[in-house]
Image (cartoon, rainbow, N blue to C red):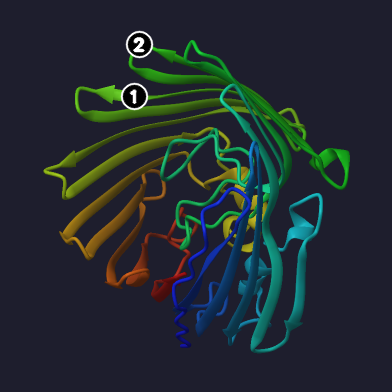
Amino acid sequence: MIFLLFPALSFSQTESSLDISGYYKNILILTKSLYSKEDIFADTSRLRLEFKKEIKPWQFYLTIDNEAIANDFSNTSDFKFIRSKQQDNLTAIDLDKVSVDNEHLYLKHSVYRAYLKYYSPKFQAVIGKQSIDWGRMRFYSPVDLFNSLAATELEPDERVGIDALNLNFSSSDFSGLNVVLAPAKNSGEASFGAKLSRKISTYDCAFMFADIRKNKVLGFLFDGYIKEAGFRGEFTYTLQDDKRNFPRVSLGIDYNFFGRLYLLIEQFFNGGADDNDTTALSSSYGESRKILSLKKHLSGININYELTPLVKLDSFTVYDWEGKSVFVSPQIRYNICQDFDLSIGVQLFFGRTNSEFGDYNHLYFFEAKKYF
């Protein structure tokens, strides 16, 4: 693995200054091929540069990625999922450039984020390549419609951007309206959404309607507290273009014990689950966003424990009630020094063939990340 350390960069905080930040990450993955069961590896190095300039009330954001994946399985079907994340498959404007794609190296350069933001207390507008997350759930989020993630995603903070006009209208009575317009190369891939938010008692609530790639979705979410425990939920009803209609429901509760132990429990029902194609989640990023899961009933548990201020243990578990399979991912994070983190962990999969997790192979990873 390659480790590259950058000195801290500082810039003046005047309104016209250009702020430059970012990170360098190296993540090594060891697992087996989903198809041939042979041992495979991928060593990913990513250099991210983030540029921000503010001229009130305007803010300009640009994030550029350079990513190299050294691997020994690029000629297999397992690599299709990585290639499916290219922007020409998912966004209106293709800002990716794959310069190398051979037997052992995949090199991609991309504009990860590029948007202009206007801000005032009662109105905000964002136009360009951005991340739009309407969801509140950690594992499966029915209302995260625009650029959702799988529950087993190794880098849950990384999302393929969406080209959109994102408008927020805020009022002084704890309510607001969010409108998203996302064009595409063809009309069948375009998306639109409107979300009306309102404070009801101690809960933040929202009602929404969206047209996501010809699928119409009605939804509702709430997020609040039961005494000191967090309580949230999401509900959607989808009318698909092929006339198949179904609900999705997710409920969750979390609690922080003594400031060091965090526990989260979520239950997910997926009326749109499709277990006819067991390779859909692993072969195509686009398809995985549509179906979310192969099975209907899934439970997720997240346990986070702070051993010391610098060392944290994190564990994610998802249980598939229909297929009797389970996904377990414990990891440990160590803040070795300021702005430099090390993580090591595993993803373990158990269950029978054609269950939610039974066809996957154990995965081991080591990550080093340096912010600057």
Determine whether 75 is above or below 95 in the image. Answer: below
- Neighbor class of circle 2 (other Cα within 10 Å; few <14, some 14-19, many 20+) is few
- The three-letter amino acid code for the residue at tag 1 is Gly
- x, y percent for residue 212: 71, 35
The residue lying furthest to the right in this view is: 186
- Residue at 59 percent across and 28 percent down: it is 246
With respect to residue 355, does 77 lie above or below?
A: below
Is 7 or 347 nearer to us in this picture?
Answer: 7
x and y, in percent, of residue 302 in the image = 29, 49
**Depth check: 309 or 282 in front?**
309
Quadrant of res 89:
bottom right
Q: Residue furthest left?
A: 258
Q: Which residue is identified by label 1?
A: 224
Please tell me which of labels 2 and 1 falls first in the chain.
2
Q: Is residue 308 visible?
A: yes
Residue 372 is situated, as x and y percent measured from the top left of the image, at 47, 69
- Rounded to the nearest whole Å, what is the CA distance between mark 2 and mark 1? 9 Å
Q: Is residue 362 left or right of residue 162?
A: left
Q: Read off the residue under disc 2.
A: 201
